[in-house]
Amino acid sequence: MRINKNRTAFALLAPLLAGIIVFFIFPFAILLRYSVTTGAGGGNFVGLYNYTRVFNSPAFRLAFGNTARFFVVGVTLNMVLSFLIAHTLRHRFLGSTVARSVILFPMFLPVAAIVTVSTLFFSDAGLVNRALMLLGLPATDWLGSGAAFWFMLGLYIFKSIGYNVVLLLAGMQMIPHELYEAADMEGAGELRKTLDITIPMLVPTLFFTFVISAMNCFRSFREAFILGGSHPDSSIYMLPHFINNNMQNLNYQRLAVGSVFTLCAITVITALVYTFEAKREAKL
Amino acid sequence: MKSRVALFLRVVLCGILMVVVIFPVLYMFLGSLIKDGTFSLDSYYQILLRHPYFLPKFWISLILSFAIVLGQLVVSCLAGFAFAKYSFFGKRMLFIMLIVLMLLPVQAVLVPNYIVFGNLGLLGTWWPLLAAGIFTPFGAFLMTHVFRSVPDELIEAAMLEGAGLPRILCDIMAPVARAGVISLIILSFIDAWNMVEQPVAFLSDTSKYPLGVFLAYFNSENLPLSFACGVLALLPGFLLFLFYRDELTRGLTYTGQVE
């Protein structure tokens, strides 16, 4: 249905738009101004000077590199693992119904519980290290070394994989049975069916799975903050840390560049996947 | 035979999943009940009754979270209805913008928000937290997908009968999309309850921190005590999960469906 009433539509959108203008658009106007000026009040226009300085600074490069790596590795792993889990859970069997809802539970874990459990399991003398030592393996400093990156990645996937599984399971249930039956008649194996039927039919769902995974990926920095502090191991020093540290140093120019850059990067990613999705839909 | 093995592998995978999710929480819960090797509720007694902050914080956080949920519900349902059932100028662009803002890390706008709230003289109060929670863009995204699933015929029929927008929203959309609305309530509640960045940025006085942040920073050397903190922080979310997990599953499903 397409009710064609601009005025009613905008009246309905008014509260949201007001919020977006006050809390996102106006703030970005302020940031944009900070990013192209110097001085405390933002008096002198300096063009892209701040940008070149920030892009050349080691802290920003580290933060950007880590964020990009975390995003690419994390979102990919999250999608692949959730696909495998959804694929396993798609038929009913002993425990499948319980597993489907239990997997959503980590979403509810508050930061306090995550912090407690993480320190218990992953601190120097935590359960994981003790188990490793029992097996004769070396103990790892999970939060203070390069392992922190993988620890955070694991935490992100642990918290958000359930949402993906729910989306993918629903998508798999929408695929017509006839397709699989026809494939069975031709003697296609499980792998063939997955590659030629399940995945192509799931593309629209995968698109939304990507959007949700990306959202949860940026949200997972919250835990990184509390567990790693504002100066964590260099492997998990991300763009939000960069922004946050410059906030504490009151270096608004650097912070503004970081924020504007983050916004641009996210806009590009979103626009790319949306164009891709629109093209695919147009082909059908 | 082959399918037997496959089934066995599935059950094993399920088992591993459940252990990974349940074991840490169970460990935390049991740990909170043990002190010096024996069963004891002392940790809870310490936090709940001996600590001067806990109870007031609990109620304030609860009220704050409820207010945020209420605001989210209004903002998101109205916007979702417009995105799902109207065609208007710039709709596609607006929706893409909504997704961009949804993906944006909170830290990116914290400072300008800080400046705005500072100019309004609202720093150190609950208003910034309330506003940040109410205008979280995810709610509108969710409700757009939820309302798209409501058949147009229902709305058309109601319009023919002369029902106004409030009636259509409350009497037709909301009941039909019940699972979606419940999901929105749950998700915005957990989000509000677990809010961290905004309180830390907007409240300089740490004694004003809501419960979620307070418990997260309650770094005590006493293990049972921090276990108990974790359990208490988890409690509201756990209850919501227990009672509404099916609705939540159905509600989240909407966000994966194509128009």
Image (cartoon, rainbow, N blue to C red):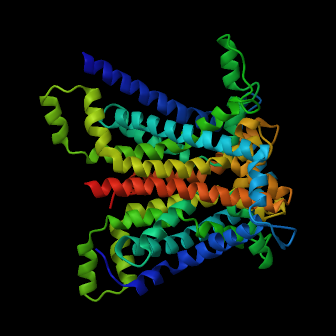
Instruction: Say which quadrant the C terminus of chain A sits in.
Output: bottom left
Q: Is residue A97 visible?
A: yes
Does A189 sit above or below residue A170?
above
Q: Left or right of B8: which side holds B232?
A: right
The single residue placed furthest to the left in the displayed view is: A185
Does A133 sit above or below residue B121?
above
Residue A102: % across, % down: 46, 41
Q: Left or right of B103: which side holds B231?
A: right
Give the image quarter of residue B164: bottom left
Give the image quarter of residue B206: bottom right
Front-lying residue, B10 or B76? B76
Residue A159: % across, % down: 56, 43
Give the image quarter of residue A58: top right
Residue ID at (43%, 27%): B13
Front-lying residue, A5 or B28? A5
Front-lying residue, B217 or A190? A190
Residue ID at (52%, 53%): A269
Residue B210: % across, % down: 73, 60
Residue ID at (48%, 27%): B16
Residue ID at (67%, 41%): A65
Front-lying residue, B94 or B23? B94
Residue A202: % across, % down: 32, 45
Q: Is residue B42 visible?
A: no
